[in-house]
Amino acid sequence: GYTPTHLRDAGFTAAVLKKLECTSYELRNAGFSAAQLKEAGYKLEQLKMGEYTATELREVGYYASDMKGAGFSAHEMRSANYSATEMHNAGYTAAEMKVANFSAKKLRVVGYTAAELLEAGWTVEVLKGAGYDASNLREARCTAAQLKAVAFPLSEMRSAGYSAGELQEVGYGAEELRAAGASLADLHVSGASVAELRHAGISAVGLRSEGVSIQEMKSAGYTAKELLTAGFSPSELHAAAFKAHELTAVGLTAKELRDGGYTTAQELRAAHCSVIELRAGGFQARELRKGGFSAEELVAGGYQPKEMKHGGFSATELRHADVSAADLKAAGFSVSSLRAADVSVVELKQIGFSAKDLHADGQGYSAS
């Protein structure tokens, strides 16, 4: 009945008490140090369970890699004065280091890449302030637009390897690019037609910034994808007579198309929009029925029987789409509608219609 504290006071060692299956937590409460438990053979994970702090465990010689393996957080490690270098070498991620309040600059110094810091949630602007250069950020797959937004000089962006085309896409003019080292052969803009500019690799972004209309660019062969990338809206593409299928082909949703002026289910059906997409885009069952979609397609796409009833679908159509009699009743169809849909009197009884309901005038059922 003696407690670990009594046994410790009597001179028993941690090693002896370990054989008695005393936990690290009990021994810690009894006054044994982390060093004594380590010497007695307790593992690091056990010491952590015993609530020894990261500071105590650092003092008895555990490396950062050991501590990470035992589950200590970056915040605990920093509080125990493990260095950023030790923690980086131990495998702590930039995200974990960020939670522990290390600065982006400190992480750059100890070897974290720009890509790791971006993944951890730091912005391009913060990384620039921390000393990452344009080359570092390009290696981290930052776009020219992102670097321009935080005021990297154009010359540095060119030196980092961004192409004239990429820089044109974010709005740099021919004179700026030429001054930064782009050749006239790359730009070739003086006096050229829109078609020639396209052939020379000038992006729709650059042309839009110079006031070229969407109609001119479409006539020159610019695609829906290029024009959307340049900042034209779906409604502008609709006004320029692009077909709905051209926009769905580059990833626009049914909702975006509807907001852009493509408002009929027929044209979106022709663009291969699914019923699920159309429902998410706000189309009502009535519109889809008018557009030629079947009850089976609407049921598969998630429309509820009640919506479909309001959309003009009959109980018979829904019955053929495998909607249950109970769901038809819940949608508000009458006994006569259900009977017309070949729902038997037995089923009608099973789903809750009373004899009075079934015998009522106009329902068609007799007492016999």
Image: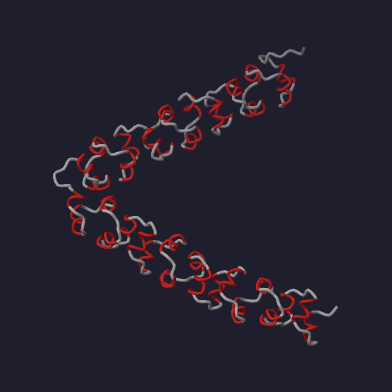
Q: Position of residue 125 (x, y in %)?
A: 36, 63
Q: Position of residue 195 (x, y in %)?
A: 21, 39
Q: Position of residue 101 (x, y in %)?
A: 48, 70
Location of residue 41 with respect to 354 vertically, above or below: below
Residue 312 vs residue 99, the one in the foreground: 99
Question: Which residue sits at x=32%, y=37%?
Answer: 237
Task: Please state if 81 lies on the left or on the right of 336 as rendered.
Answer: left
Quarter-wise, where is residue 63 in the image?
bottom right
Task: Please state if 21 lies on the left or on the right of 278 as rendered.
Answer: right
Location of residue 262 with respect to 97 vertically, above or below: above
Quarter-wise, where is residue 352 in the image?
top right
State the residue lying farthest toward the right.
1
Question: Which residue sits at x=67%, y=16%?
Answer: 363
Q: Position of residue 346 (x, y in %)?
A: 74, 21
Which scheme is used to colour this image of the protein? Answer: secondary structure
Residue 5 vs residue 259, the one in the foreground: 5
Task: Please state if 288 lies on the left or on the right of 143 as rendered.
Answer: right
Q: Quadrant of the C terminus?
A: top right
What number of labels is visible?
0
Question: Which residue sits at x=58%, y=29%?
Answer: 306
Q: Quadrant of the N terminus?
A: bottom right
Location of residue 322 with respect to 250 vertically, above or below: above
